[in-house]
Amino acid sequence: MRVTDLERLFVQQVLDSQFRSSAGSLMTQRLEQKFAEIFQVRYAIAHINGTATLHSALVAAGVGSGDEVIVPPLTMSSTSFAVLHAGAIPVFADIDPLTFNLDPNKVESCISSRSKAVIPVALYGLSPDLDPITHLAAKHNLTVIEDDAQCVLGRYKGRLVGGIGHMASFSFQSSKHLASGEGGMVITDSEKLAAAVRRFNSLGYAGVAAGPGKGKITRETIQDPNYERHVSVGFNYRMPELCAAVALAQLERAEELVNQRTQVAKLFSKAVEGCSWLRAQYVPEGYIHSYWTYVLLLENLNDLTWYDFRNKFMDFGGDGVYAAWQLTYLEPAFRGMRFHENQRQAYERGLCPVAESTQPRLFQFKTNYFDFVRAQSQADALSRTIEYFEKTRNYRTVALS
């Protein structure tokens, strides 16, 4: 089940506290401590959502007006919005045609004297190739901020995704592996970065520090008319206790929730076995995919459109299938825009050719089924859709050995 008695228990504990200020943010502190423990880092800072997390991380990294941040074009536009929120310039690097993640070689070609950070996204639950990205970052003094909103308990060459860059951002939005309606988390091993993140997400308060519950001030101090509260400018990005209660329960069930999606992905994988004209996202050796969604690429077939396939899938009982997001720089909010006088890239078609070829041909199948009978029916609908087009259009099927 998506929500169990554990979530209800933790929410009730918050309600029973009557939101007394003396109770502090005990549920949020528990969530932060548990998150840091699971992801094997020293610090975790809870946020109101997974865009605020990126904004806080960028500011903590010293990113500001006119700086450049390298981002992928194929992901939710929130990644690039956060760069704009920090006053910086999104620089789009093209993707790998097999994994659909940032291509490290394209990242290198985007680096300039104004580059300050890079945000590799673990797209659909699959880690990007982080080693060459972190090596480039070290060479050019860039901060690596992992955007792991779509990846929980994924692994990269044996390492847990999230503890590899300087910071990592997670989301608890309602569609994610761990869902509390809204919420997010920044994790890091750096005390300096953690303190900067927490201060930025807490209105620049003097009484905060890197770890949860630290930096507390006395009642006598806070009642003093001469007390100076705000030592820097910040946002109120703190996570509400009710959201933290649900997120904590979901975190304690993380393996169960991720495994649920992985099992659904296996059903879809079996359905496409032998199909030569639908290609799954490539998972390199040593990676573990967490399958926020299961993705297929439609190979270039001139007589079969994305809509043809989607409509037939629904005819056979499919729930529908999501398209990939429009490339960020082709969204109306970005297309043709100049956000800074030093912006090097023109946000127009032709900027990232691989991403532009890939995006219109992607099918994103839901994996958040908590009824395996329903999940199997969706895999069966996919099988019937493939069989229909192979019979009616003579598409080639690869024989399995």
Image (spheres, grey):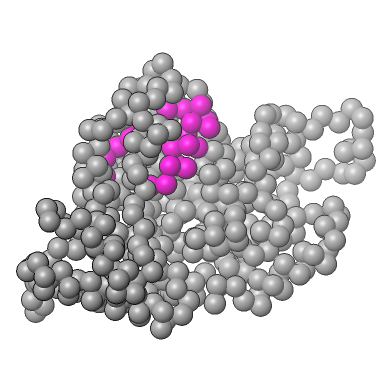
Whether residue 15 is in magenta: the answer is: no
Q: Residues in magenta? A: 75-95
Residue at x 30%, y 59% (from the top left corner): 363
Please, is residue 228 above or below residue 2 in the view?
A: above
Q: Is residue 75 left or right of residue 84?
A: left
Q: Quadrant of residue 379?
A: bottom left
**Which quarter of the rendered picture does the N terminus lie within?**
bottom right
- Which x, y percent locates residue 10? 71, 69
Whether residue 80 is in magenta: the answer is: yes
Residue at x 23%, y 76% (from the top left corner): 384
Q: Quadrant of residue 297?
A: bottom left
Query: Is residue 224 shown to the viewer in this render?
Result: yes
Query: Is residue 105 shown to the viewer in this render?
Result: no
Q: Who is closer to the viewer here, 349 or 64? A: 349
Q: Is residue 397 left or right of residue 349?
A: left
**Which quarter of the rendered picture does the C terminus lie within?**
bottom left
- Which x, y percent locates residue 50? 54, 49
Please, is residue 242 above or below residue 111 in the view?
A: below
